[in-house]
Every structure is written in structure tokens, then in C-alpha cells.
Amino acid sequence: MKKLLILLTAIAAWAAQAQTNAPRTYFEVYKSTIDTPLVRGMSKAGVLTGQAAYPVELRIERLNIQSTTNTVYAVALRTHLPHGVLQVDYIDYDELAGLIRGLQFVSQSGHSVVPMDDFEVVYRVRSGLSVAKISNGNNVIINIKCGDANGTRNQIAPYVLDQLQSLLTGAKSAIDSLAATGQ
């Protein structure tokens, strides 16, 4: 019985480890394609400046799979943590419009969203990246949380949330322009 319990525990740990390495977005799925050349391009879309616990850089990424001529686009949020650690969250192109609208709602939300003392408004994307506005009495906190298993909470000021929305809008426009020209 003891050996069976140890075996089941080991299998559960292995399964949990396997799940954390699985691609979470369509972009990551295409990026992990094997047996064909992949051509990936990146352009800097901006950096969140101001009051953020950790610097965040936004990049537009394009991935072309040569064998199928499929081209996919995403925006990468690259959170720079201490000691050279980098956490990357991809936002698939098809999620951008909803995320931009969601961030506007999160930004404008206040105590009037629910008839309670405290509130929490959260928007999540496929990668697990989430943006949350949380109140505890009159204290309101805005966090961006990386989507991986060890995701870091990055506390930001309200105007930085508006800046993120603006950068994502610009990134979406840039992708739209690239796609319209067939690139």
C-alpha cells in the first residue's frame, strides 16, 4: 500500500510538472512546431513606465511556419524580474480586442460595480495572464499577474493600466497593418 501511495504521488507530481510546460496560447503551440523551419519576427511596441513593481516590455511577434505558410501574431508581455529572470506571457491576436475593452472596464471600475464593501474585477487571457483591480475598503490595488505556475504579481498605478491599454491598442493597429499588407 505504501509503495502504491508513493507511486501515485510521483505520477501526480510528474503530471503537474508536465502541465506547467504545456503551451497555453495558439502562438506558443505554433512556436513549438517541429520538423519545419519557423521564421519569427519581433518589434518593440513599448514599455510600461512609471509606477510598476517590475518593468514590463511589450513586443509584437509574428511567426511564420514555412511548410504550411501559416502566419500567426501575438503580443508578448515581458516582465523583467530581479536576478535576470524574465517571464513572458503571449496574448494571441484574437484576444487583443477583448482584452483592450476588458482593461477599459477594469480601469473604470470602482465600488459601484457591486453593492458590497469590497470588490475585485479581473480580466484573464488564454495564457493565464490576469489584470485585477482589488479593493479592501478605500485601498485599491491593481495587479498584473503572469500566467505561468510561478507567476509574479506586478503591482501598478492606475495610470499605468491606462498606458497598458494604449500600448495594446497601438500593437493591435500595427498587427492589423502588417496583416493587411500580407506580411
Image (tube, rainbow, N blue to C red):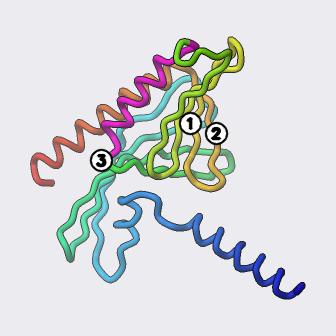
Q: Residue at point 28% right, 76% down?
A: 37
Residue 103 among those drawn in magenta: yes
Is 137 on the left or on the right of 3, as rendered?
Answer: left
Instruction: Please rate how many residues cluster around mark 3, counting C-alpha atoms within 10 Å: few if below 14, some from 14 to 19, many from 20.
Output: few
Amino acid type assigned to the residue bearing label 3 in the image? Asp
Pointer 3 with pointer 2, Cβ within 8 A: no
Amino acid type assigned to the residue bearing label 2 in the image? Arg
In the displayed structure, 38 sits above or below 86; it is below
Instruction: Name the image quarter holding the N terminus.
Output: bottom right
Q: Depth check: 83 or 25 in front? A: 25
The local secondary structure at tag 3 comes to: helix
The local secondary structure at tag 1 comes to: strand
Q: Residue at point 50% right, 24% down?
A: 160
Q: Depth check: 20 or 49 in front? A: 20
Magenta range is: 93-111
For marks 3 and 2, give the CA distance. Answer: 25 Å
Q: Residue at point 48% right, 50% down?
A: 89
Q: Which residue is mark 2?
A: 153
Q: Position of residue 39 (x, y in %)?
A: 28, 66
Q: Position of residue 28 (x, y in %)?
A: 41, 62
Q: Which residue is mark 3?
A: 94
In the displayed structure, 20 sits above or below 89; it is below
Residue 101 among those drawn in magenta: yes
Q: Which residue is mark 1?
A: 144
Q: Position of residue 27 (x, y in %)?
A: 36, 59
Labels in figure, total: 3
Q: Position of residue 140 (x, y in %)?
A: 64, 19
Pointer 2 with pointer 1, Cβ within 8 A: yes
Instruction: Name the image quarter holding the C terminus.
Output: bottom left
For marks 3 and 1, give the CA distance. Answer: 20 Å
